[in-house]
Amino acid sequence: MARSETKTAVLPDGLRYKSKVSGSPFVATTSFGSATMSCFMCGKHRPRSMMGTRKVLGKAQAVCAPSCKALDETISNAAAGKQ
């Protein structure tokens, strides 16, 4: 079985991706309170003010508060109300 051609290669300056946009899609903030975190349960990034902690597998994890489903409904209702 022949190997497929690789689409990326290590460039002389050490960068690997030519077409990938550099940086993070999540804006860095100067204040700790307005930073985003990913929910341990659903993986979506939310502001820290929308997060709570829950003990999962014996360790406190950041999760959506009050729940992932309730927070999604609240956000979608708020977005629908703006339109």
Image: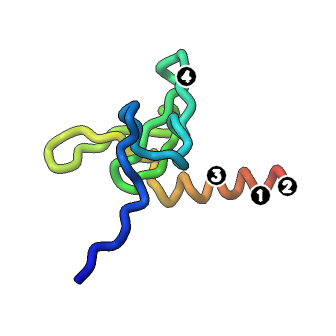
- Mark 1 highlights which residue? 80
* Disc 4 residue type (three-letter): Thr
Residue 75, horizontal then vertical, whole percent = 64, 51
* Disc 1 residue type (three-letter): Ala
- Mark 3 highlights which residue? 75
Residue 8, horizontal then vertical, whole percent = 41, 54
Q: Residues within 10 Å of mark 4 (few under 14, many from 20)?
A: few
* Disc 2 residue type (three-letter): Gln
Sequence-wise, which precedes: disc 1 or disc 4?
4
Q: Tell me if label 1 and label 2 are in contact, CB under 8 Å.
A: yes
Quadrant of the snapshot with the C terminus: bottom right
Query: Circle 4 — which element?
Result: loop
Residue found 43% across the figure and 37% down from its top: 37
Of circles 1 and 4, which is in front? 4
Gap between marks 2 and 3, in whole Å? 13 Å
Q: Residues within 10 Å of mark 2 (few under 14, many from 20)?
A: few
Q: Is residue 34 left or right of residue 4?
A: right
Gap between marks 1 and 2, in whole Å? 5 Å
Query: Circle 1 — which element?
Result: helix
- Mark 4 highlights which residue? 29
- Mark 2 highlights which residue? 83
Query: Circle 2 — which element?
Result: loop
Check the image and name the residue furthest to the top.
Answer: 30
Check the image and name the residue furthest to the left.
Answer: 58
